[in-house]
Amino acid sequence: MTEPLPTAKPEEVGLSQAALDRLSSALSERITGGNIPGAVALVARHGKVAYHRSFGRLDPAADRPMGTDAIFRIYSMTKPIVSVAVMMLWEEGRLLLSDPISKFLPAFAHTRVGVVSGDSFTLAAPATPITVQDLLRHTSGLTYEFRGTGPIHKAYAKARVARLKQTNAGHADELAGLPLLYQPGTVWEYSRSTDVLGRLVEVISGQTLGGFLSDRILAPLGMSDSGFSVPAANQARIAEPFPKDPEFRMDIALLDIRRPALFESGGGGMVATTMDYARFLAMLLGSGRLGSTRLLGRKTLELMTSDHLGTITGAADLLPPGHGFGLGFAVRTQAGMAPFPGSVGTYYWGGAAGTTFWIDPAERMYAVLMIQAPQQREHYRVLFRDMVYAALAD
């Protein structure tokens, strides 16, 4: 049986109860005001969970309170889990970070770079191949169709690369046949790179991505409510958004997680509870170990959570000032610059529907916020971080 994460009162781990109460009030006020349906928040320090609260309603269409065991669509918070899977295979000597991905996915041997001119593009050979490291740090030259309106983004949209009725193998092959937005290794461009990593895991392991994650990460860590879909027995715990965002007046349609997924998106297809994800973060902060379960070595985590960009730049809307990117996470490189608090070495990411997490090794702290409000995600990510850091008492 899985051992629960240890708990403590806030003051026992150097957090202010009064400041955490202010966080609770801020979230409650936004929910009472009709901005978001509900939320679950968790803060842990020095290896103990000191704050784990639920707010509001599980589903705005039903009069059911949000529970701390609510299941959320975590979208791009899938990426760190898949990145850990790749690094587990790396530790087994099954791949090198410098390996061209065409070694495992032959279709990428023929991928070309799109040279854009106005509304069209010509094709050129890549100066260097896409490597495993490029996929992990988003310097592959791949993109997301919603990241722009140029001809290459339109080519992605025309190919319907986001469709759910496809396999991971078919998705990777489709991406390999589309033009790259940039030369590999030259620009940080948030992209479908982690979807390709998911297919890489399948090819190297001989399992489906979901099967590998379940066997090697989710089950060993006790993440019993995590995966690419929610079984019928647990569907009453699914957190739902407002059908229309009350602030931006936009319709909201999130991933259907009630049916088994054909396309197991390594970049954004998973679900989890707040506590499940906290167990994953506890493993990361534990240098790859949670209790008696070790997934990765200490130096592997050091490598993953170091900046891998250096002078490579790009996408200022997603990578704030004072930050670089490691192997699956944004990484803070400067104490200042960014408009929110943190320590050098803090690493984090979030999901499109509003979920977010960070780990601060210097403070021995991690935190998770789960909401389902896509249009408001940036506000709550920063608000949550600001108010949790304000609770540090010593």
Image (cartoon, rainbow, N blue to C red):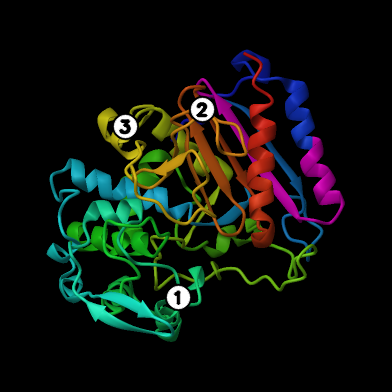
State if disc 1 and disc 2 touch (CB < 8 Å): no
Q: Is residue 68 visible?
A: no
Give the amino acid at mark 3. Answer: Glu
Residue 214 spot, x, y in % from top left: 36, 52
Of pointers 2 and 3, the one earlier in the residue sequence: 3
Of pointers 2 and 1, the one earlier in the residue sequence: 1
Residue drawn where x is 34% and y is 51% of the image: 137
Q: Nearer the viewer, residue 3 or 228?
A: 228
Residue 92 spot, x, y in % from top left: 16, 43
Identify the secondary structure beneath mark 1.
loop
Identify the residue under disc 1. Answer: 162
Residue 61 drawn in magenta = no
Identify the secondary structure beneath mark 2.
loop
Residue 37 drawn in magenta = yes
Residue 343 marker: 2
Magenta extent: 25-48
Structural crowding at the residue carrying mark 2, measured as other residues with C-alpha within 10 Å and reported as few (<14), some (14–19) or many (≥20): some
Residues at marks 3 and 1, CA–CA distance in whole angstroms: 33 Å
Of pointers 3 and 1, the one earlier in the residue sequence: 1
Rendered-image quadrant of the C terminus: top right
Give the amino acid at mark 1. Answer: Ala
Residue 71 marker: none
Identify the residue under disc 3. Answer: 302
Structural crowding at the residue carrying mark 3, measured as other residues with C-alpha within 10 Å and reported as few (<14), some (14–19) or many (≥20): some
State if disc 3 and disc 2 touch (CB < 8 Å): no
Give the amino acid at mark 2. Answer: Ser
220, above or below 47, in the image: below
Residue 303 spot, x, y in % from top left: 29, 36
Residue drawn where x is 65% and y is 43% of the image: 382
